[in-house]
Image (cartoon, grey):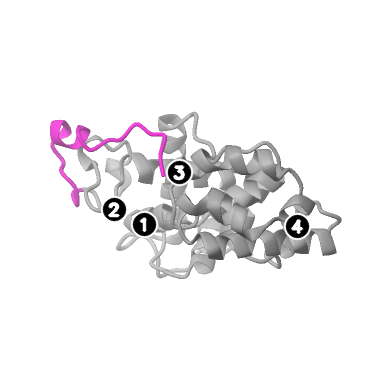
C-alpha cells in the first residue's frame, strides 16, 4: 500500500516514515514483550461480548463483570434467548447497559440466524453483526482467530497523531494508512503495543516524555515533562483500561 505524502515529520519522505514507524514498533516490542489483549476470554464468543462491553468502559471493569455473565450465558443461543433485564443487571456497571444489552442480544440472534451460532472468522461477516464495527471485529480476528488486524481505539489514534504517522481522524483511514507502514504479520501485536504504551506512558494529558523509549524518534517529544525523575512518576504499571 502506498503511503500518502501528507503524513510524517516535516521533510520526511514516505520511505523514511515507513522506516521510522517500523523502528518505533520494534522498540515498543522490546519495551512491552508481554503486550496482549487485556480483556479476559476463552473463546471467540466471549471476546466478542467482552469487546462490545468495553465501549466507553475500562477493560478492568469489563473483566470484573464477565465471569458472572460468561457463567450464565455460554452460547450464542443463550444470549439470543436471554432475559434482557437479567443481562442489564449483570453488565450495569459497564455503562450504557441497555444499548450494550441490545447489541449483545441482537448480535447473538444474528449469529444463530446466519452462522449456526458460531462467530465468523472474516471481517466482512463480523461487521454485519449488531454492535460490531471494524475495531471490535479486528480485536476478535486478531486475538481469537490469529488473523492480523489493526485496532484503532482512542489510545491508538492519539499515538499515531503524536508520532506523525498520520493526521487523519477517521478510524478507517487511520487503519489503512498504518497498514501501509507496518508489515501485515505485525498488525495485531503492533496494536497491542501502541495501546499499552498509551495506557502506561503516553497519556492523553501529560505523557511521560522524559522516560519514553521512543523519545529520539517522536516528533511530539517535550509535550510532557522531560526531566526523568518527574516523568517517571507518571508511568503506570497496569493492568489498565
Q: Which-is-in-front pick, marks 4 and 2?
A: 4
Please name the residue shown 40% across and 70% down the image. 6
Read off the residue under disc 4.
81
> Which one is nearer the viewer's eye here, 85 or 175?
85
Residue positioned most to the right: 116
Q: Secondary structure at mark 1?
A: helix
Q: Position of residue 130 (x, y in %)?
A: 66, 66
> In the rendered image, which quarter contains the C terminus?
top left
Q: How far apart are the two marked residues, 1 and 3, measured between alpha carbons?
A: 22 Å
Q: Could you classify mark 1 by the number of other residues whose Cα lies within 10 Å: few (under 14), some (14-19), or many (20 or more)? A: some
The magenta segment is 222-241
Q: Is residue 26 magenta?
A: no
Read off the residue under disc 1.
158
> In the rendered image, which quarter contains the N terminus?
bottom right
Q: Could you classify mark 2 by the number of other residues whose Cα lies within 10 Å: few (under 14), some (14-19), or many (20 or more)? A: few
Q: Which-is-in-front pick, marks 4 and 1?
A: 4
Q: Position of residue 155 (x, y in %)?
A: 40, 52
- Dots 4, 2 in contact, CB < 8 A: no
Q: Secondary structure at mark 3?
A: helix
Q: Which one is earlier in the sequence, the residue at label 1 or at label 3?
A: 3
Q: Which one is earlier in the sequence, the residue at label 4 or at label 1?
A: 4
- The quarter of the picture where residue 237 lies is top left
Q: Could you classify mark 3 by the number of other residues whose Cα lies within 10 Å: few (under 14), some (14-19), or many (20 or more)? A: some
Q: Position of residue 31 (x, y in %)?
A: 40, 31
- Dots 2, 1 in contact, CB < 8 A: yes
Q: How far apart are the two marked residues, 4 and 2, measured between alpha carbons?
A: 41 Å
Read off the residue under disc 2.
204
Please name the residue shown 50% across and 39% down the image. 64
- Dots 1, 3 in contact, CB < 8 A: no
Read off the residue under disc 3.
61
Q: How far apart are the two marked residues, 4 and 1, measured between alpha carbons?
A: 39 Å
Amino acid at each position: 500500500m502506498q503511503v500518502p505524502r501528507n503524513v510524517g515529520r516535516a521533510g520526511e519522505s514516505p520511505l523514511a516514515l515507513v522506516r521510522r514507524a517500523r523502528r518505533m514498533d520494534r522498540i515498543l516490542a522490546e519495551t512491552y514483550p508481554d503486550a496482549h489483549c487485556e480483556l479476559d476470554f476463552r473463546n471467540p464468543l466471549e471476546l466478542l461480548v467482552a469487546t462490545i462491553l468495553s465501549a466507553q468502559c475500562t477493560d478492568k471493569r469489563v473483566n470484573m463483570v464477565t465471569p458472572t455473565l460468561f457463567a450464565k450465558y455460554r452460547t450464542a443461543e443463550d444470549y439470543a434467548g436471554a432475559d434482557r433485564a437479567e443481562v442489564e443487571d449483570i453488565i450495569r456497571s459497564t455503562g450504557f447497559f441497555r444499548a450494550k444489552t441490545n447489541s449483545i442480544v441482537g448480535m447473538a440472534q444474528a449469529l444463530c440466524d446466519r452462522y449456526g451460532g458460531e462467530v465468523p472468522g472474516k471481517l466482512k461477516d463480523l461487521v454485519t453483526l449488531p454492535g460490531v464495527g471494524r475495531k471490535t471485529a479486528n480485536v476478535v480476528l486478531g486475538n481469537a482467530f490469529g488473523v492480523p488486524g489493526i485496532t484503532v481505539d482512542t489510545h491508538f489514534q492519539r499515538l499515531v497523531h503524536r508520532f506523525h504517522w498520520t493526521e487523519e481522524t477517521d478510524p478507517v483511514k487511520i487503519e489503512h494508512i498504518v497498514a501501509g507502514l507496518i508489515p501485515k504479520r505485525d498488525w495485531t501485536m503492533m496494536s497491542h503495543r501502541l495501546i499499552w504504551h498509551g495506557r502506561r506512558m503516553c497519556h492523553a494529558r501529560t505523557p511521560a516524555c522524559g522516560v519514553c523509549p521512543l523519545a529520539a524518534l517522536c516528533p511530539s517529544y517535550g509535550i510532557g515533562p522531560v526531566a526523568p525523575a518527574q516523568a517517571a512518576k507518571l508511568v503506570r504499571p497496569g493492568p489498565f483500561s
